[in-house]
Amino acid sequence: MRGPSGAGKSLFLRAIADLDPNEGDVVLAGQSRDSLAGPQWRRLVGYLPAEPGWWADRIGSHFSDWAKAAPLAARLGLPAEAGDWPVTRPSTGERTRLALVRALAAEPKVLLLDEPTAALDVNSVLAVEDLIAERVAAGLAVLWVTHDPAQAGRVSRRSVIVSAGQVTDEAEENA
């Protein structure tokens, strides 16, 4: 999903994740979002915001099982001892990759990604794209927001444009 800043991409993701009041129906595998409690829905639908939050003093405290998450962190170029780091230690890019690990470790059925590679170097971008591609091949559904048309071409099967709160299939827009 692409579009100009302020077009509503993040609001759209937050609505799907049931984080903000909204109208509309969201259904996953025949199960309506409205039929589940918010926390139950958010176990199925993970959301990685553009600026992930950290609420505990140490990175590992944000994971139910850091030992299980550490191999994912290693795939993204992070050391196993990152779980022992204070949250003030990682760079912005490291925090972004750790937040992605946190989202993947929860094993959602759908993952909503809001510019997950915006603060990353080229090698980290490729590592994230490869890891997500593997998860998609294994059945994870992903809705990925990016401002990079080349990245959209690499990671998407279908691309939509959000503009002024309207969602349009990119193929229709370019026709």
Image (tube, grey):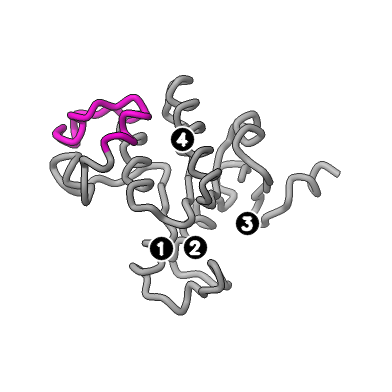
Q: Classify residue 104 as left or right of residue 23.
A: left
Q: Are marks 1 and 2 in contact (CB under 8 Å)?
A: yes
Q: Is residue 86 magenta?
A: yes
Residue under circle 4?
131
Would residue 83 be counted in the magenta stretch?
yes
Query: Within 10 Å of the Cα at label 2, are there few (<14), some (14-19), or many (20+) other Cα atoms?
Result: some
Dot 2 or dot 4: first in sequence order is 2
Give the alpha-carbon distance from disc 4 to disc 3, as whole Å. 30 Å
**In this picture, which residue range is highlighted in magenta?**
70-93
Q: Amino acid at mark 3?
A: Gly
* Residue 30 locus on image (x, y percent): 56, 73
Q: Residue furthest bottom?
A: 35
Describe residue 21's horizontal placement relative to residue 159 as left or right.
left
Quickly name the residue at label 3.
165
Quarter occupied by the C terminus = top right
Residue 15: assigned label: 2
Front disc: 4 or 3: 4
Q: What amino acid is labelled 1 in the image?
A: Leu
The residue that disc 1 covers is 19
